[in-house]
Amino acid sequence: MKKVQLERILQSLEAVPSPRPDIEQYPTPAGLAAEVAYIAHGKGDIVGHRVLDAGCGNGVLGIAAKLLGAGEVVGVDLDPLAIQVAERNAKRAHVGITWRHADVSAVEGPFDTVLMNPPFGSQTRHADLPFLDRALAVASTVYSFHNGVTEDFVRRRIESLGGRITDRVDYAFPLPRAFRFHRDEVRRIPVVLLRTEAAKG
């Protein structure tokens, strides 16, 4: 499947209505989801692999992985409404994915690859760390988005867990006005995508 075709399908997916600010439910844009899935595909981290979409929201990353040939895909989210939306989106995209309403800390592996856009820590400082910690505990390879200003801290955390960052890409992440306390219709923040290989053994 070409990237433009993948992006078109992802753009048609339903968004999570009434996003919750407490868990920073910022949607992953279709173009960005398609790009990270394509990067992972090019690295050999998708086809036939068991993939986890941690903090799946509407399921866009998991669905992208499945459309590109992933084996079993599991999506996990704390919000039951998000899981319902993800289920509908998977049916719309004609893919079979296992969706679980659970905290990321409850996820059991093993997985080959994790794709995730965790909270950036705008509401709760370092809210992305439980996602990162669990991902590196249950998977061999992790693709994760992080607020660019926290990259040094995130790198130290990964190193402390024995992980090794192999690739990074910078993005300007669009945050649409989803909550009452937002002033701008769309605000762009610097975001970094990291590909991390977990410690062996």
Image (spheres, rainbow, N blue to C red):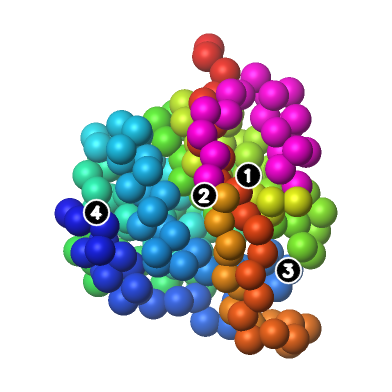
Residue for point 36% across, 57% down: 34
Quarter of the image for residue 8 reads bottom left
Q: Measure the C-alpha gap from mark 3 to mark 4.
A: 31 Å
Nearer-N-terminus badge (3/4): 3
| Three-letter code, disc 3 | Asp
| Three-letter code, disc 1 | Phe
Residue corresponding to mark 1 = 131
Estimate the x, y position of residue 98 in percent, counting from the top left: 35, 52
| Three-letter code, disc 4 | Leu
Q: Which mark is residue 22?
A: 3
198 w.r.t. 62: above or below? above
Observer-nearest residue: 58 or 142? 142
The reply to whether residue 98 is visible in this rendering is no
Residue corresponding to mark 4 = 67
Residue 161 in the magenta stretch? The answer is: yes
Q: Are marks 3 and 4 in contact (CB under 8 Å)?
A: no
Q: Residues within 10 Å of mark 1 (few under 14, many from 20)?
A: many
Q: Measure the C-alpha gap from mark 3 to mark 2.
A: 18 Å
- Extreme residue in the right direction: 125
Residue numbers of the magenta segment = 150-169
Q: Are marks 1 and 2 in contact (CB under 8 Å)?
A: yes
Residue corresponding to mark 2 = 116
Estimate the x, y position of residue 102 in percent, counting from the top left: 56, 53
SS state under label 2: strand
| Three-letter code, disc 2 | Met
The number of callouts visible is 4
Asked if residue 54 lies left or right of residue 163, the reply is left
